[in-house]
Amino acid sequence: MREPVRVVILGGGFGGVAVAQELEKLLPKLDRPVEVTLVSQSNYLLFVPMLPSAAAASIGLTHILSPLREILRRTRIRVETVESVDLEARTVTTTHPSAHTEQILAWDYLVIALGSVVNLARLPGVAQHGLPIKTIGDALQIRNRTVEMLEAAENTPDAEQRKRMLTFVVAGGGYSGVEIAAEINDFVREAERECYPVIQPEDVRVILLHSGARILPEISESLARFAHRKLAERGVEIRLGARLASATADHVTLESGERIDAHTLIVAIGSSPNPVIQRLGVEMDRGRMRVDETLRLADRSPVWALGDCAAVPLPKSGNMAPPTAQFALRQGKTVARNIVAAIQGSAPSRFTFTGLGEMVSLGRGTAVAELFGRIKVAGPLAWIMWRTFYLMRLPGLERKIRVWLDWNMDRLFRRDLVQLSVQRTERVTHAHYEAGQAIIQQGELADAFYVIVRGTVEVVREEDGQETALARLGAGESFGEVGLLQHRRRSATVRAVEPVDVIALGRSDFDLLAATWKNLGQSLDEVARARSADS
């Protein structure tokens, strides 16, 4: 019996899954065995277009997740992380998050559909305090933060503090940014009206930041103006020509120097190539792998790339295909057909799809749609089209029914305000503070221990209205242990002298670490005694 042809697909998004689905249809017709393996970090396909709706609780979080093993019955699924690709040796190295062991997968044909990753490192504090909107975990975090801010604001007597808690800043005026801003605005204003008597409509602010001259640059100017007007009518503040510069836990700073007091920042910006792709050493085009019109990697006959990570040329125009689901699905089918053609020794197919159009939901029964580049629809009809199109694209009858029921229930009942806490109460976290900002305040309860990663802080004590400087601490030094070890309130204020990044360890984790790590415990005791003596 002949050895099976090994096809390995990297990525469990729309593109990778589309390749596997099409191969499952085509391979039974071949006269030789083919083994298809799909490597994905999760065991489900996330239906990304509905992610903002899930984040704002208008549909169930799990209802936009389709288990890979249900939709790919004849494909081998490996839930692993891709560590590296060796194009010369024709191998892929993966690791499993639990087993922590490397696996080497050999391939005869390789499909790279790894997508992009969120990279906010160039913006101080944004990686630590911004909430991306890319994964189902991101959607859960946004939902929990929104409800958390509503609960806190309802019981805050300080009106200015209440407004800061209810200010939601969204960075990015493309599809994702506009849709999440619209959904969060609807969610918070409906909740305020129905369930939170203390909160007033004027307390709520949703601010959409966009660096360009208009939001939604992907669609026509007339539809973008309609979207801008509708969002503004519903209370969304749109700032054009506004670039995000930095963030802390309680405010956002723009490149202009303007400061916006807010406890919630949602970021729909900052995509960059997957690190695995960056290490391949192949020809790139604006951060995406260059492929030919058959989606084959240049000079790599057994390798194809598609989706967000590939610069796929469009027919006639010469432009690159946008990184959207409708293009990834068609690219997947083309790649599958070309793999079969390579196995059979026949000519490959060109990618000829040019797009059906674009649709963007604006919430509350309104959307904009541009079809085939010339038909423009706005308002309720576009909203019905948006919902119908994506409902039909959702994999599996069960998921279609669940989402359809969610949408109808959303019209009849209030959105769910339950927080879904899936993380431990205390954990190691990263935080960023700007110059002059207090990290811990004298007199407050001690609840965390801090290690400085970058920057400088000053330790000061206030007595009888006079402030005394006690110390300056820099990278590698720590603070906050005195109150934790001696179970007392903070005896001093620690303030950032310059922009500072810290690692924070909650009380219970600090106690466990200090009690079990002998050398650390002794060192911390010595530091605490010395600082207590100085005080």
Image: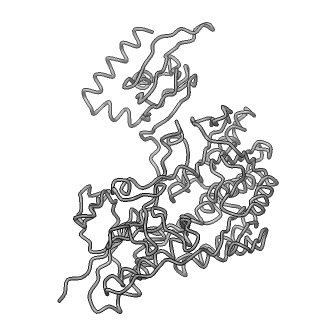
Q: Is residue 271 above or below residue 491?
A: below
Q: Name the image quarter holding residue 505.
A: top left
Residue 292 in the image: state x and y as whole percent.
Answer: 43, 70
Residue 174 in the image: state x and y as whole percent.
Answer: 64, 56
Residue 179 in the image: state x and y as whole percent.
Answer: 66, 59
Q: Name the image quarter holding residue 444.
A: top right
Residue 84 in the image: state x and y as whole percent.
Answer: 30, 58
- Asked whether 296 or 20 is in front, the reply is 296
| Figure label count | 0
Q: Is residue 177 above or below residue 151?
A: below
Q: Name the image quarter holding residue 61.
A: bottom right
Determine whether, in the image, residue 34 is placed left or right of residue 208: left
Residue at the image position 62 percent from the left and 66 percent from the top: 59
Q: On the rendered image, what quadrant is the C terminus found in?
A: top left
- Asked whether 6 or 424 is in front, the reply is 6
- Asked whether 48 or 427 is in front, the reply is 48
Q: On the rendered image, what quadrant is the N terminus found in?
A: bottom left
Determine whether, in the image, residue 534 is placed left or right of residue 233: left
- Asked whether 451 or 180 is in front, the reply is 180
